[in-house]
Amino acid sequence: MYAHLKDLRIVEGASFVAAPSCGLYLAQLGAEVIRFDQIGGGPDFGRWPKDERGASLYWEGLNKGKKSIALDLRKPEGRALAIRLATAPGKGAGIFLTNYPAAGFLSHENLVRHRADQITVRIMGWADGASALDYTINAAIGLPDMTGHPDDARPVNHVLPAWDLLTGSMAALSLLASERRRAATGQGEEIRVPLSDVAIATLGNLGQIAEIVTTGQDRARVGNDLFGAFGRDFVTADGKRVMIVAITARQWTDLLAALGIGAEIAAVEAARSVSFASDEGIRFEHRDAINPIVERAVRARSLDALEKAFDGGGVCWAPYRTLGQAVAGEPRLVSANPLFAELAHPSGHTYPTPGYAGTLRGEARLRPRPAPRLGANTEEVLAEVLGCDAGEIASLHDRGVVASA
């Protein structure tokens, strides 16, 4: 964690991945992020993965460093408190992060009635308000049909919620840009960040829409080959699988030297009147000849021997591991990574916990904070943000409008 955004207060009314990840990143940069949830937990409070007692490890992972207030949003008084929180006065406040429907009681039009310079960042599925999740957006834009082996026509869903995570990052960037503009002009605004737009814009930025338009053809499946360059999985003499990639000219020459296959590759170049040295695309086009040479060289070596040759020669590669093997066996990822600290969490478990993924050099990295228990900061937020006195807070509790941990 860092303290760069310590003067900002963001109120988060959201669930699932995209919006909570946005709030997480901002909290890890020092912002005060206050998340409100329905009493008993919102729709993501019990999401998998869970521990043996049913506590959501997912929820406590995405809500690290935030404050929590529990409201009964089914009651008019609970909804009124949510609006008061989102629009509370103060410099650096009046910023609301949500994936609630655009036309509901937390619409931007309703919020600006309470604060004229309100900033609302709204995560959406489709830009027209239709419901969508990462998996359905992926299906809609065609990525599952590009993924997988050429001899299997079934679509392949990706296990990583990439559009959720990219949308959360874009929402954080947009929020900071809007807050910067408001500081200069006094003007608030609503920002809408639909998963569908992030996804299709990304494919456009990567040249894939242009590829479709100019060639008239969808991209074919290439299995585990890296599209447009040299890269594929190979099996070692002791049955271990590794991923090897050579995009740059240096990576390519280092790979040939480490495997001792320079002469064989040169023979292919001479026979086909090509040069693989500087054009990664040509390596992809001639993978039918390159891959068998690399395959034989890798299969002749054990993983240990390959590791010594590759790491000593600057080759870009990695052995395939399970996540458990990666956590236990690659110190750079967790055990020796200053990004992580051992923290006790609301579930009762203590485990390595990441802070902000970027390193702000020259600034001290603060220890990450765990997620709060649901409603743990209810009284604090009511008193410090909304100015409620003890009697009002007690009355809200008695009427079931709010709840504490």
Image: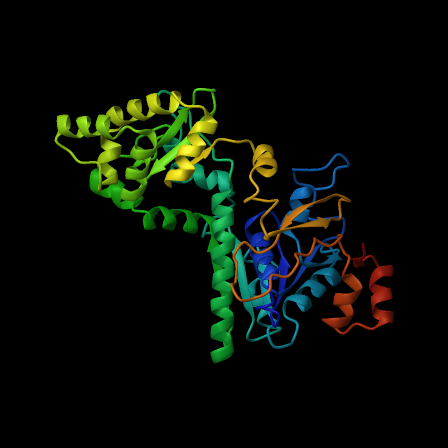
Give the quarter of the figure containing the N terminus: bottom right
Give the colour scheme shown. rainbow
On the image, the x and y values in percent for residue 163 come to 47, 46
| Count of numbered marks | 0
Residue 211 visible in image: yes
Residue 71 lies left or right of residue 48; in this view the side is right
Residue 36, compared with residue 42, is above or below; it is below
On the image, the x and y values in percent for residue 353 come to 65, 48
| Occupied quadrant, residue 70 | bottom right
| Occupied quadrant, residue 144 | top left
- Depth check: give the residue in front, 336 or 140: 336
Residue 151 lies left or right of residue 160; in this view the side is left
| Occupied quadrant, residue 74 | bottom right
Give the quarter of the figure containing the C terminus: bottom right
Residue 205, compared with residue 253, is above or below; it is below
Residue 248 visible in image: no
On the image, the x and y values in percent for residue 202 come to 38, 49
